Structure formats: C-alpha cells, structure tokens
Amino acid sequence: MKNIALLLFTLTFFVSCQKKELPKPNILWITIEDSSPQFFGCYGDSDARTPVIDKLAEEGVRFTNAFSTGTVCSPSRSTIITGVRTYKMGTGNHRSNYAIPKFIHGFPYYMQQQGYYVTNNAKTDYNVGDVKKFTKQAWNESSRKAGWWNRKPGQPFFAVFNYADSHQSRTMTLPFKTYKKIVWDKLAEDERIGNNDFKMPPFYNDSPEMRKQFARVYNSIKLTDNRIGELLDRLEKDNLRDSTIIFFYADHGEGMPRGKTNGINFGYRVPFVIWFPEMYKHLSPWGTAGAVTNELIDFEDLAPTLISLAGGKIPDYLKGRVLMGKNRSEPVDHLALSADRSDNGIDMVRSITDGKYVYSRNFMPWMPEARYIRYMEIGDIKQIMRKELAEGKLNPLQKSLFEPRPAEFLFDIENDLWETKNLVGNPKYKEVLAKMRKQLNDEVLSSRDVMFLPEYEIGLISKTGNAYEFRLDSTRYPLKEIYAAASLSGKRGAEIAIKQTELLRSKNSIVRYWAAMGLQCQSAETLHPFQKEIIRAMSDKYPPVAVTAAAIAYSNYKSSDAETKLISWIKSDNPDIALMAINYLLYVDNKAPFVETVKAVHEMPDRIYNVKAACVDFLGSMGLVPNNYNYRR
C-alpha cells in the first residue's frame, strides 16, 4: 500500500508539473524603415554587411514571403497598429487623419489587459484621427526613452524599437553631406560599402553618379544592423534574452525610386525574422535554428498574433491570421495588398501575390511609376535619373519608369526579382492572370474597399462619421456599380471610351468620377470623338468629376474654358480638389498658363503641405525652382 501511495503521489506531482504553464513570453519588436530583403546577407546578398540580422535569421526563422500591406510609412503603420487593412479603414492615403470607429484600438491596448507592459520607442505615424488619444490608449509608454526597463518586477513586456537609419531620408532625400555625417561617418572604415562594392538593380542606369547614390542604401542598412546589435546587447545584459521572442522586420519596401510608394513587389516585400528562445521554441510551427519558410504573411496578421501570444481574446473586427501558438490559423494561398496616395502624389493600385507572382492593377496609370512626389524629387538620385532621361542615356526598361503605366502588371518574382518583364500579354501566363484578376475582384467586393471613393469624399464622410462603417452601407456605397466603372479605368481603346462616356451620365457621382478618371487614361486619338461629352462634364456638380474633365479637355482640346476652370480649381479651398488639379497639370505639355496661379497658391499660408509640395513639383518640372527645393512639413 505504501508503494502504491508513493506511486500515486509521484504521478500526481508529475501531472501537476506538466500542467504548470510557462510564464508569458516577453516580446521585443524591432522595426526598421524602407528596406527590401534583397539587400540583406541572410536573403542572399553577398555584398551586404548585416551580421547581427543574419545571426538572428541563422538562429531563428526567416520568412521569404512577408509583405507590407502598403508601400509607404503611415498606411503600413495604420494596418500594423490597428490590424485593419487601410482599404477597409479609409487610411490608405499617406498622412491623413480621418476618423476611425471608437471600438477599434491599437492592439497593445489588448495586451495591457493581459498584464503586459507595452512600450513604443518611438515612431507612431498611425494615420488615424485624434492620434494623440489613440496613442495614449495603446501604450503604457510611447517616447524616445520608452523600453522594458520601466515595468514592474517580473511583468511581461512588449517593447517596440523603431530604427530610422535605413529611412529614405538617409538613402536618398537628405543632401549627400548630411548622409555622410549621420551615416558614413558613424561607420568604421572596414564597415563601409564602397561605390563599386555591389550590383546595381537593372532598372537604374549603372553610372558612377548613380552608384555613389545607391551605395547609401547599403551603408544605411549596415548602420541599422549596428544599432540593432546594441539593443540586443542591452537585452542580454538585462538577462532577458532567454525569455524574449524577437521580431525583426521593415515597414515596407526599399525607399528608392520604383520601390517605396509603388504597388509592385519592390514596394511591398519586406525582410522578416522571428527568433525564439529555448523555452518558447515550441510556439514556432516552422521550426527554429535557421528555419526558412515561404508561408505567406502580411501586416494584417501581426495584431491577432500578438494578442493571442499575450493570452487575450481577439476582437471580431480583426480578420488577420494568428501565425503561431495553439490558436494558429491555417496558411493562405494568396495575399491582397494596396497602394494609394503618397504625400502629394495621388495614385491607386491593388495587388495580389502568391509569393511566386505578383499581379498589380493600376487604376490611375496615366501617371508613371516615377511620378512626381516632392519628397522623392529632392533626392539627388531622382534628379540624376531625370537628367539621364533627358540626355537619352536610359535603356527601355529604365526609361519606362517615366512613361504611363499599363493597366496591369504581372511579374514572376521568383525568376524575375527586379520585375523587368511584364507577363500580362504573354499567353503562357493566361491562367495565372485570370486567377489573380478574379482574386483581386473578389477581395475588392468582399472587403468593400472604401478607397474607391475619391479622397475628397472620404474627407466629407469623416466630418460626421468614418469610412470604415460607411463602406458597409450598400445603399450609400453601391460598390458593385462603382467598381464596374473603376474596372474600366486604365483600359485603353475606343470601345472602352464609349462605355466611359456613357457612364458620365450616371446618377451616381462616384461612378461618374471613375468614368472621368478612365477617360483621363485614354490617348488623344481615342478621345477625339468625345469632345462634346467631356466638355459637358466640366460643369458636373461633383468637383472630382468636373476637375478631371477639365484636365482632359485642356490637354486634348486646348479648351480655354477648361483653362479657366482649372485655374479656379487650383485655388480651391478644398485641398483634395486643388491637389487633383495640380497633379493632372504636372503631366500636360503646356503648363505656362498656370504658372502664376501655382506660384500664388504656393505662397498662401493656409495651404497644406501636399498642395504646396505639388506646386513646387509643378514649378520644378518647368525649371522655375531648384529641383532640390524642399518645402518641409
């Protein structure tokens, strides 16, 4: 009996030990800016010098198919912090401040409820209305001094550290002498990457001037790697490395022309690594110690994953996947991604990727990939590109960055990393194209993509409500009808133009807007028979239709009435309408009649940054101000 009792005691003790749960993991989140994976050693670039990040990947899990949901900072961070895609929230346009529903919180709010001490050091840029209140609710601390060190003894932490050393400001927009001071001079001599120590992407001209500029990318990433090493040393010294899961990733693709702001793989794909300490390796479904996974993930997945790791209940409005742990979601076979306005450069792209291919639908393809965005234009590399274009030094691929885009891109990003061959017209890829078109159409309609409203309309909605909830009302937002019109935009030819001119008579103002936008993409030859319909549309009561029609009429019919109306629209008190007018005029041949108006608007103290920046782009395109003139926010 004594032996039986001892056995029962032993079994009971063993079972109780098995049931004893591990403490909640600490989580360190390291984000960097404006970086694509192809410039890191762990992703196969032998020219890169990223030993700290490479070691994290060597000991952790490296993701080959991780994507930002957007291609510029604030929209990407909007999805990261809320867990909601920008085309559902209405936050796709860079640096806007539109209202969001009160029930949507920054996801660290839910981690706080599970006992976590949550800190942000220090970037926010969340692209939502009332951002101060939103930020205060999300974090215990959000400042340049924030970190795990202020928590209670034994309290689990979630700490974010954002490093700006690889930001576009360092790699291209700040003057070279400033880059030298804050990047080059911070590196030891043996750490520096020289102008001839790397391969140039083929869509840039391989000239000495371009190499001097592109070397900034490698050196800025090297400095970033050093900074991350310093942070990990502190984690180690605080005896926290063995209890902390480490995430490393970039907020979107490379901050260079054709990358950041563009809806292609070079803008979306990011480096992404997760490192697990021994005690939490069981949480990884991918293995550890150098595991590589091609599982598709994007920023919509981050909020539910972190809430789940903290032991919290995931709110119903979060639709992303839980990537790890006992509540892990099933993998997906494709992702939907998006790009909208960046600063003063309007645009709209929707994309689908399965990791092998990326399909992008350009809804405003009358603008080139290298469109006018003041923050890009001030960079030496962009000025060199424009200079080499004017001198005829660019090959067809390099020149194409400055030409109107096709309505669709399809790239084999597994075999054509730099996206040099558009496969849309290749019959071998007919089935791939059809499949991805359907996936995109299904996503737009099922998600009720609210960004098919012009920003002018989102601004009006946000005065009394929010775009997230507005989009769910099919009476106020008949998306199927709107999307049918938008789906024609970018497609060219007489048959399409006939349909678009018919849609100019629609009772729905947003349908008329997309009809006009589609006509803006048509050639002068195609538009010739439709002069009467377009002239009539200049008097449309809905401003986005009227200003678009006026731009078409001025460019194609030399209409003096259109010229007068455009001058009026440039001076509009509504910044979205003024911005539309100036953006259209950036791409017309005869800009002269608008110079004095643009100069006057630029000097108005009450005009917002985007309007003033567009004015400078307009004047810069005519050589009336220096190309590096930087109107700061």
Image: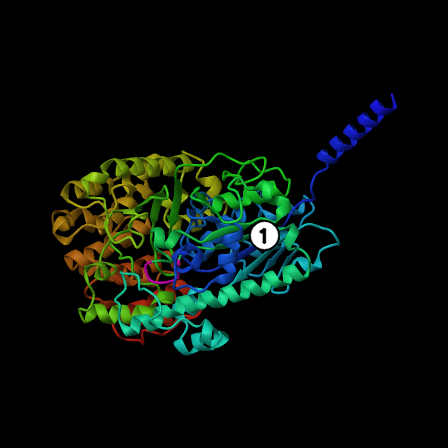
- Please name the amino acid that badge 1 sits on: Phe
User: What is the crowding at mark 1: few (fewer than 14 residues within 10 Å), some, or many (at least 20)?
Assistant: some
* Residue at screen point 22% across, 58% down: 397
Secondary structure at badge 1 equals: helix
Would you identify the image quadrant in which residue 434 lies?
top left
Residue 346 in the figure: left or right of residue 525: right
Prevailing secondary structure class for the magenta stretch in the rendered image: loop
Residue 230 in the figure: left or right of residue 520: right
Above or below, comparing residue 195 to residue 484 in the picture:
below
Q: Quadrant of the N terminus?
A: top right
| Residue 265 percent coordinates (x, y) | 35, 51
* Residue at screen point 35% across, 45% down: 351
Q: Which residues are magenta?
A: 254-258
Nearer to the camera, 76 or 48: 48
List the residue tagged with mark 1: 134
| Residue 61 percent coordinates (x, y) | 50, 48
Q: How is the image coloured?
A: rainbow
* Residue at screen point 33% across, 53% down: 347
Nearer to the camera, 130 or 380: 380
